[in-house]
Structure formats: C-alpha cells, structure tokens
Image (cartoon, helix red, strand yellow):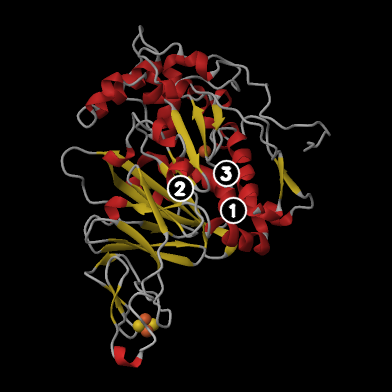
C-alpha cells in the first residue's frame, strides 16, 4: 500500500525515535530481566491506511457481527463471577446474548440465551439456580443443557429430549478469564491464544480478583475507543503533564499471531522534552498525573527515580506477592499493554489494568468501554466487584474505585467522541497510521481484514 507521499510502506520500518531504546534501558536494570521482555517481534503489516467507513458505516458493523463476533474467540466473563454450580451470567455482544453457566460438574458451558420453545431469553440477569427454567411457559433444562421437563409434554410428541438439548458455544479459559466462541468451526482455543500464556508466566492473572469493574458508554465506534489505548503516540498531546517521567516515543511495539504488545517505559524522560529532567522531576511527573499531589518522598542521591519507584512497588506488593522481590525494575515501573484480538487488553506485570471494548448494541457510533482492575490477594479471594455502569455523560471520576487513574481516563476518553464526529464529517477517505508506533493498530486491522474476508 502507498502512503500519502506515494512511498511504499509495508513493514514496521527501521526508524526509531531519538532517546534510549527499551532494550538498552533494560540493560540498566538492578535485577535480571525476564526473557519475555527481551523479545522483539515486528511484522510486515500492510494496513498503513484503512477506510474511514469501517468506523462509521452500518454495513461494516453488520459485517463485523456476521464474520467477526459470531466467529471469534472473545472474553465473556471472569471465572469468579460464576464460582459454584448453577451460577450463571449473561454476556452480550452486538445484541447477541450468551448464557454462561457453571454446571454441577464444575464445567463452564455457554448457551445462546434463547429458549427452544418460542425463543424467550432463558435468563434476564446474572444469578444462581439449580436448573434453567424459561419464565414464559416453563420449559426447563439441566445445567448441562440437557432437556429436563416440558409442561404438558403430551402436547409436544414431536419434541424429544435428545433433539432439544440446548446448543452450546465453545468455551475456553485462561488466566481466570472465560472466553466463548459462537462458531462450530472455531479454531482450538489454545491455538488462538498462541504464546500469550507464556508471556504472563510471572504475572498469573488467575491468582487475582476483580477489585473494580467499571463500564462506560462512549459515543464512538468500539475500534476508535480501543485504538486510543494501543499506542503511546498520543501522550505528547493528550497527557503532556507526564512527559518528564514517560518514554512515550521510546516505547517498544511487538506483534505476534493473535496478540500484540506495547511497552512504554516510565521514570525515564520523553524525547519530546528539550531539557533533561532531574530524577525528582521524573518522579513528580508521575505523581502529578496519578496522585494529584506532591510525591511523599525525595529521590535519594544514590538512586534513580526508576529504582526508587521499583523499590516502593516491591514493598507495597510484598505481603501479597512474595516473589515480587525478584521482579525487575522494568516489571515494577513500565506499562505492558497487550491486545488479544479482537477486543481484550490485559496489562502485564502487576499493573491491575484490563480493558475490553464492545459495540453498544448494533450502533456503529457507540460502544462500551470497560476497565477491570485485577488485584492480588492473600487467603480467600474477595468477592468480585459488581459492574459499575457510568452513563455517557458521567466522567470516570464518578468511579472513585478506579483511584487516581480516573483523571487519566478522562483525558483519554474526551477525544474519542470527537474522533467519531471528525470521521463522520471527513471529506478524506482514510485514516493513516504510523510505521512503528501504531504497530498494534495496524496489526489489529490486518487481523480484522483476515476475519472479514472469509
Ligand atoms: S418460550 Fe420458553 S417456555 Fe415458551
Ligand atoms: Fe492515554
């Protein structure tokens, strides 16, 4: 594909920002750095430009429903939302509902949320029950989907128990997350995940609980929203207060089969600055961003801000994660933001963040963004936090359970509906991505193209 200047751009390119590159920064670590952070994976990604109508058109949304959402593996819920037999929850994507049920045998199954009599949704909300009984006429299934009873069965001689088992979607679990796939032709779940579980070996997400779960409606396409969280290129304009303590354009971007990764180093200055900040200024930038207060400490003479923040993070986590003493400064400081196609964004190391982005019903101009904090715990896992819904006009600061980061989310999401306005108003036909810093977005669109083709 040619870019605006007519130059052929097919790969992630060789050019990188001035400033310290991430692999060189890792060489300064006070601890051994895990192999996974030493991986570098660039790919030839042709999607330098994509048509604007994939963010705005109903026809494109409808194609996504048929060829993406009805066929892809997707994160549906956390295992701890349905801990015991009979516990169930509802996952919704583009108006389609799946009923996710834990059986008496502890197996998690997913069924279309649809009665085989005249189609009523079998369940209206999450809950617990010993059987799946349709509220309309009372047809009832066992938790494993086998038909249990029909009122006046004599009137349905054509309905046999074997033929009226609930259809099942495929289910896979990883890291405490339950994934479903609605297609009979789904690729094996393990193949879909690929090497991703190995990346999280040192940071097991199943040993965490849902500390906070906030969902917010946004007036933009789901891809507009998630792409705002797949690069650090926006930091210079959107979060300029961070620049003394974030190596925004020194981030590393990698892409594998179905997942990609960005690593943004912290407590290292942005190459955009025309001065060299002091160690205290690097620390200050972080506190200005997230805690809105003066840092409680000064960086000692013999330490860098990066070493100090790593040490403080280890001390904070030590009671819950004894192995934290071995984790590198990088793991304690940096942002590792993964994307598992199409819409799930777990963060690496001990950052609590996970995002999911979904269309809001069948409106291509509206989506649901969720922030899920997964925190380590000791002893028995606390109950998962219920979903806190924020209306379209409510800022993230209305969700104090997200802590100081909600101010950053407000900075991030303020642009997104305005992107949608701009896309609707555009006379030009394409959005244009960078060679390297928008690697994750280009990787996503390459996978989306592949999904929609077949
Ligand atoms: S629609 Fe479910 S029992 Fe009739
Ligand atoms: Fe941001």
The answer to which of 123 and 267 lies nearer the viewer is: 123
Query: Which residue lies under the disc numbered 3?
Result: 227
Q: Secondary structure at mark 1?
A: helix
Task: Please state the horizontal and vertical placement of residue 367, each as a whole percent of the image.
Answer: 53, 57
Q: Image point 21% across, 47% down: which residue? A: 382
Residue 97, given in percent of the width and then of the height, sits at 44, 66
Label 3 CB sits under 8 Å from any ligand 2 atom: no
Residue pointed to by mark 1: 417
354 or 311: which is nearer to us? 354
N-term-proximal mark, 2 vs 1: 2
Pointer 2: what residue? 188
Q: What's the residue at 63%, 60% (across, down)? A: 63
1 or 3: mark nearer the eye: 3
Tell me if label 3 and label 2 are in contact, CB under 8 Å.
no
Most extreme residue toward the right is 6
- Would residue 452 be seen by someone viewing this image from the given angle? yes
Say which quarter of the image contains residue 275: top right
Q: In terms of image quarters, where does ligand 1 lie?
A: bottom left
Instruction: Identify the mark nearer the N-term, 3 or 2.
Output: 2
In the depicted structure, whether residue 191 falls above or below residue 179: above
Give 73 or 23, whichever is nearer the viewer: 73
């Amino acid at each position: 594909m040619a870019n605006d200047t007519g130059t052929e751009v097919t790969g992630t390119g060789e050019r990188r920002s001035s400033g310290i590159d991430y692999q060189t920064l890792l060489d300064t670590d006070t601890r051994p750095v895990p192999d996974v952070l030493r991986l570098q994976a660039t790919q030839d990604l042709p999607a330098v430009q994509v048509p604007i109508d994939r963010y705005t058109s109903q026809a494109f949304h409808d194609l996504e429903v048929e060829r993406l959402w009805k066929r892809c593996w997707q994160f549906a819920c956390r295992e701890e939302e349905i801990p015991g037999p009979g516990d169930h929850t509802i996952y919704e994507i583009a108006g389609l509902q799946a009923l996710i049920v834990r059986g008496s045998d502890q197996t998690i199954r997913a069924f279309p949320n649809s009665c085989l009599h005249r189609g009523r949704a079998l369940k209206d909300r999450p809950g617990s029950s010993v059987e799946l009984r349709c509220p309309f006429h009372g047809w009832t299934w066992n938790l494993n989907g086998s038909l249990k009873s029909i009122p006046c069965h004599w009137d349905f001689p054509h309905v046999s128990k074997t033929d009226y088992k609930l259809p099942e979607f495929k289910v896979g679990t990883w890291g405490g997350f339950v994934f479903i796939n609605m297609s009979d032709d789904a690729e094996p779940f393990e193949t879909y995940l690929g090497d991703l579980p190995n990346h999280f070996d040192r940071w097991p997400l199943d040993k965490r609980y849902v500390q906070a779960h906030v969902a917010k409606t946004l007036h933009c396409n789901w891809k507009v929203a998630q792409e705002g969280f797949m690069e650090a290129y926006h930091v210079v304009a959107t979060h300029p207060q961070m620049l003394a303590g974030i190596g925004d354009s020194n981030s590393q971007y990698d892409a594998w089969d179905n997942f990609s990764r960005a690593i943004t180093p912290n407590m290292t200055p942005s190459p955009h600055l025309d001065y060299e900040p002091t160690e205290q200024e690097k620390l200050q930038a972080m506190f200005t961003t997230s805690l809105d207060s003066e840092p409680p400490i000064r960086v000692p003479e013999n330490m860098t801000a990066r070493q100090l923040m790593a040490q403080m993070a280890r001390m904070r986590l030590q009671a819950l994660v004894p192995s934290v003493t071995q984790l590198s400064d990088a793991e304690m400081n940096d942002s590792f933001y993964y994307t598992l196609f199409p819409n799930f964004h777990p963060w690496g190391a001990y950052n609590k963040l996970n995002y999911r982005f979904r269309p809001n019903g069948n409106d291509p101009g509206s989506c649901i963004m969720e922030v899920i904090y997964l925190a380590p715990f000791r002893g028995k896992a606390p109950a998962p936090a219920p979903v806190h819904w924020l209306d379209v006009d409510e800022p993230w600061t209305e969700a104090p359970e997200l802590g100081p980061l909600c101010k950053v989310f407000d900075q991030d999401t303020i642009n997104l509906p305005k992107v949608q306005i701009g896309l609707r108003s555009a006379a030009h036909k394409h959005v244009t991505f960078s060679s390297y810093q928008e690697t994750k977005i280009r990787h996503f669109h390459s996978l989306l193209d592949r999904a929609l083709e077949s």
